[in-house]
Amino acid sequence: MSQPPFIQRLKLKNFLSFDSVGVDVELRPLNILIGTNGSGKSNFLYAIKLLKSLPTGLWEFLREGGGIGEWLYKGDASEAVAEIEVTINLKVILPNKTVDKALRYSLDFLVQNDQLLVDKEMLLDNDKLPNFEEALYYQYNPRISFRAPFIVQIREQGEDLFDTPTPSTAHRQSVYQHTRHEFQYPVLTQTGKAFERIGIYLDLPFGKDAPYRKPQLAESFDEENLAPDGSNLAIVLNHTQTFHPDAMDEIFEKFKKLLSRTKRIQPNTTSNLIRLFVHEVMGKGKTVPISAYRLSDGTLRFLCLLVILLSPTPPPLVCIEEPEIGMHPEMLLFIAELLKEASTRTQIIVTTHSDILLSMFEPEDVLVCEHDGAKSSIKRLSAEKLKSWCEGDYALGEMWLSNAFGGVR
């Protein structure tokens, strides 16, 4: 990508399977995460999903994931404080200019009396560190703020830091949920919006009851980006067809790689409902519409991948769990090409269990996740360290299954 990746670095401590030492992971435009079942790959993505939840409801997100305590590392006898720190690159729009910012956001939380307690939250200008006072945009720390109501330090645009009260619910919310003002706090507000726009697809559903098979209310969803469960697929395709016809043409042409008999992809609107049809050529040139109800799981999942990866207005980061699911092995090379192309326009993080798919990438694209029985760890591959294997003309997937760099049982 011409711009630096949205997430430059992610640090996790006492979070799910990551212990008090934690992990410090540098991320690239394209990141392929591998490892055995239960090694911590999904936990890493859930940390990113937590960032996405900050503007809409941290407490609700943690509660829906089993309760606050389920998110804390359980390997230590002492009470754990989960720590998440992320360094991001963001283009911030100010009243008279646009600037590129490297920002460092951190969040610490724990359980207190069976309730969520935000122990610390901070946003800093990474380029102004180690000058803490100059770098600080926002700070909340109840351990040093004993006054009531809760007091935070926040910087207005062009002003010095000042104290301001926060809602009484601040101990279970992020600042991005209760402080939004584009002009007064442009850096803070736009950081929250960027987190909220992250596209994360951990469990695109399968089966006859999958939501993307059903008619969709035309005004119910985001029209530009696919929902995490794909439930607005027809709506996004309809919007793309209307406002981004070139992007729709590209989706159609690439869809034919999977289903060459496709004549067109057609979202139809009737009575405020949008239904998805794929028109196929049958028999002696006859074209017939096939509704989403009758398309195969793999066909619909591939269409979802195209909508995600070819979006004309992509989010700053896209995370996909196992894009190979439901795909014929011959399609994996094409999926790898899609991922590489998409990484020139947005940051990509995917997990995979496919040695075939892995072989389509460079060693430096790959993060290996392992669990030693007590904690998860993550390391990035190096082509230099695999030099002897590469000279033997092994594919990367073959090296993986031969235990050249871990990530196997």
Image (spheres, rainbow, N blue to C red):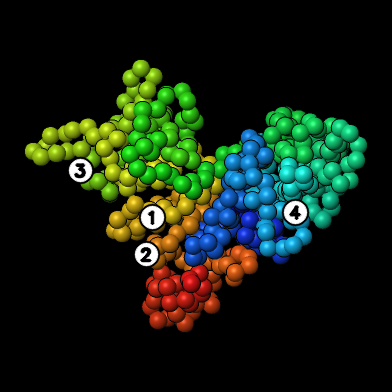
Compare marks 1 and 4 and give the one earlier in the sequence.
Answer: 4
Query: Label 4 to label 3, Cα distance in Å?
Result: 55 Å
Compare marks 4 and 3 and give the one earlier in the sequence.
Answer: 4
Q: State if disc 1 and disc 2 touch (CB < 8 Å).
A: yes
Vertical position of residue 322 compared to residue 371: above or below = above
Compare marks 4 and 2 and give the one earlier in the sequence.
Answer: 4
User: What's the amino acid at mark 2?
Assistant: Ile
User: What's the amino acid at mark 1?
Assistant: Glu
Q: Quadrant of residue 300?
A: top left
The residue at 56%/43% (across/down) is 198
User: What's the amino acid at mark 4?
Assistant: Val
Query: Label 2 to label 1, Cα distance in Å?
Result: 10 Å
* Residue 261 tag number: 3
* Residue 356 tag number: 2
Q: Is residue 403 left or right of residue 48?
A: left
Query: Label 1 to label 4, Cα distance in Å?
Result: 36 Å
Q: Nearer the viewer, mark 1 or mark 3?
A: 1
Q: Nearer the viewer, mark 4 or mark 3?
A: 4
Q: Nearer the viewer, mark 4 or mark 2?
A: 4
* Residue 324 tag number: 1
Query: Label 4 to label 2, Cα distance in Å?
Result: 39 Å
Residue that protrudes farthest toward the top in the picture: 271
Vertical position of residue 241 compared to residue 283: above or below = above
Q: Nearer the viewer, residue 73 or 356?
A: 73
Query: Label 3 to label 2, Cα distance in Å?
Result: 26 Å
